[in-house]
Amino acid sequence: MQPVVITCGTRCGRRPARPRAARHEPCCCSALMRTIGRSASSLAVSLVAVLGGVLVGCIETDATVPGGEGASPAVTTGLDDDFAAAGAARGVPADLLEAIGHVETRWQMVSSDGEHDGQAGAHGVMALGGDRLAAAAALAEVDQADARTIAAVNIDAAAALLADAARRAQVAADAPLDAWAPAVAIYSGIDDEEARADYLRAVWAVLVSGAREVAESGEVVAELTARRDVTSRVGDGAGGQVAGPDYASALWRASPNFSSRPSARVAMVIIHTCEGNYAGCWGWLRNSASGVSAHYVVNESGSEVTQLVREASKAWHIAATYQCSRNSSVECGKNGTSSNNFTIGIEHGGFASQSSFPTGQIEASAKLVCDITRDQGIARDRNHIVGHGQLQPNNRVDPGPNWPWSHYIERVRALCGDGGGTTPTPGGEVIIVDSNNANNDAAKGRVELTGTWSSSNSIAGYYGSGYWYATSAEVSAPATFWFYAAAAGTRTIDAWWAASSNRASAVPFIAYDAAGREVGRATKNQTTQGSQWVSLGTWNFTAGWNKVVVSRWTTPGKMVIADAIRVR
């Protein structure tokens, strides 16, 4: 079925100037996306209906976060005005509110029913859920459904909740930012005293350093300028911490929620998302009342890892018996036994519904998994490093569709010396340019699209969080992977794609130097050699911004894939 194109009068994620009373009205694209459970950031969307109720969804036909069918990009741009308006209306510091939002979600519109039994869900930029969502909506006098799904309403409700916390803590509206710490502690809803102090450290770290998040489209999600009038809380309450017993780079925060393993060896690592912020996550996992735990928690930036349970013990992180049919018929002898018996669980600050994961977090997690697999003798592949939702699909989806599995496994292998990865070769840096600009270092590489390309992750084996695809045709409408070379020299270019029978068998890849001169080209069959780096050629590039173009100009009627390139 051909897509039906519906064009909006306004660009989603950017509200036109209008009176405050009307600010919460969504543009038509956003309203459509909420109706079917997706979000949008582009002017044109395609509504695709797959018969039989298999899928109703939207695929953006403009630049968006690769994720494709089933993914839920969670980015709304231009939030600074919403924070400012909410702060002014509720009498709370807008910068403080914005810093809290960054700690909670990195300013993404998340939606979660919770990772653990007894844990409230989390929704919107401010991750409001459960009783906190109900209280915030009541204080702001807004509908709970709007507070869950509309960014401006969600931020306003959180501001009302923060104002109530300030009232309870007897903090004046015009008090210096440092004086607001007691109010933020109440606002956090975290019971564990040490975890609450960790939450405050994280919020104040954002205030001190500032923050900026940019959407795949290049639009600014929000930007917080560093505040020089606040005092860093680094070190507050952090004394006396010891290294993890199994991973020296971790902090040991012992949880009482564990039991003895049976005699079977540890065979797998399970990747989870906290469905919340890091401090609240590890604080809950070591609460005896929670009845849950994990071996490790990795924070959002990758700057800190907490160990809660020794690897030799059984943590309580998955509520599913093992079925090898969910894991490519691997380890079938374990069928019917608790997955906790033979696995190590790693939680990650963040949400399964977020559009991307920070590079630092992925790298820190990969280092941890390398250490675990090396110590425990676990195979470093996708059947032994698995997602929570893969083994417990009835009610869990984490780490979500945008976890960069291919890149992640590659980094684990590279860090353990198995080859692959982005370890620099002698004489130069290796640069990987992904199809999702959120995964790229903007100073080193980016992807640009011309014409109509759609995002997807429906075919396994992609790099990062998804790929772009377009129908082959005699048109000049390529996907362009730019990379920056600090100096002229010879570079080898590799490409990655998710192979399938509907792909074009002669896809042109054309390389240009910084002056725009063609330096080489190759033609590759994308029906084969998927899920690996395939060499295109070794060519001479000049200093500056060079590029590799993926052309659609080949035999019509097939799919051309733009996934990732590697420069080495």
Image: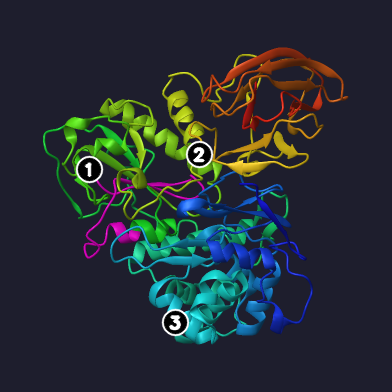
The residue that mark 3 highlights is 135
Amino acid found under the numbered disc labelled 2: Pro
The residue that mark 1 highlights is 339
Q: Residue at x 79, y 29 (%)?
A: 474
Q: Give the distance between the C-alpha atoms of the residues marked 2 and 3, in whole angstroms.
A: 36 Å
x, y percent for residue 378: 29, 27
Residue 180: tell me if it is visible. no
Q: Which residue is drawn at 33% across and 52% down?
A: 240
Which of labels 3 and 1 is toward the front?
1
Which is nearer the N-term, disc 2 or disc 3?
A: 3
Crowding at mark 2 (Cα within 10 Å: few <14, some 14-19, many 20+): many
Amino acid found under the numbered disc labelled 3: Ala
Mark number for residue 49? none
Q: Give the distance between the C-alpha atoms of the residues marked 3 and 1, in whole angstroms.
A: 37 Å
Q: Provide the residue span drawn in magenta.
A: 283-310
Which is nearer the N-term, disc 3 or disc 1?
A: 3
Q: What element carries label 2?
A: loop
The residue that mark 2 highlights is 404
